[in-house]
Image (tube, grey):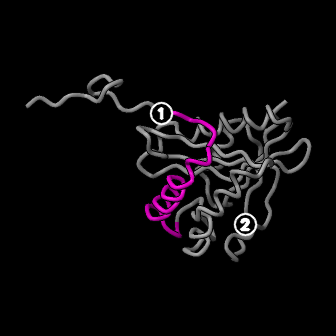
Amino acid sequence: MVARAPPNRPAGRAPALVVRPARLNDVSRLSGFFVEAWRQTGPGALGFAGANDEAIKEIASEEFLKRRLTTPAIQMMVAEEGGKIIGFSSVRRVDKSHAELSGIVVLEHATGRGVGSRLLRKSLEGARKRGASTLIAKTDAANEGAVRFYRSAGFTESGKTLGRIGGTKVELRVMVKKLR
């Protein structure tokens, strides 16, 4: 018996990476994505600073995701490969000229392949199209990898602040990018 490649994909090629706005029919897969991302990295992972099982359970709940997807001030993007969500980003409109990157999450096996960069580019485009002139990103102060990532995308550090994640205080670096 000879193995054949699925239709629409040449033999030996990986499925194409698609980055697009999240839709309501993505809710179940998004929920599974967040649970998988948390399972892969756990509470000590950079990017999940201060998170705990209870906070992840809330973020991964279908009710929470539906509310976020139907909130006009929030734009969520997904990166998918072969129909599986492997990355996520979210931008929240703060006011007329400012938006905040609420987060970028990429499954561990997909890191280092440009998934986060593509999600960030689409998030920047979306914020710009929605009228924002500045995008703010906050990251765990100890997450040097994230700081390098944002700097390479043209963000500058504008200070530190304390944030609260799942009831835990976390020191955050504030990164800013002018969009216009």
Q: Which of the marked residues, 2 or 1, is nearer the chain's N terminus?
A: 1
Taking the magenta stretch, the answer to whether it contains residue 176 is no
Query: Badges 2 and 1: C-beta atoms under 8 Å apart?
Result: no
In the image, taking residue 129 as reference, residue 14 lies left or right, namely left
* Outermost residue, left side: 1
Screen quadrant of the C terminus: top right
Residue 15: give x, y in percent of width and height: 39, 32
Picture disc at residue 171: 2
Give the class, few, some or many, for how many residues have Cα within 10 Å of label 1's Cα (few <14, many ≥20).
some
Q: Amino acid at mark 1?
A: Leu
Q: Nearer the viewer, residue 128 or 153?
A: 128
Majority secondary structure of magenta residues:
helix
Marks 2 and 1, how far apart in space? 33 Å
Q: Amino acid at mark 2?
A: Glu
Q: Quadrant of residue 163?
A: bottom right
Q: Which residue is mark 1?
A: 17
Taking the magenta stretch, the answer to whether it contains residue 23 is yes
Residue 14: give x, y in percent of width and height: 35, 32
Q: Residue at the spot x=74%, y=57% of the render? A: 173
Q: Which residues are magenta?
A: 17-44
Q: Is residue 180 above or below residue 75?
A: above
Q: Residue at the spot x=58%, y=75% of the render? A: 54
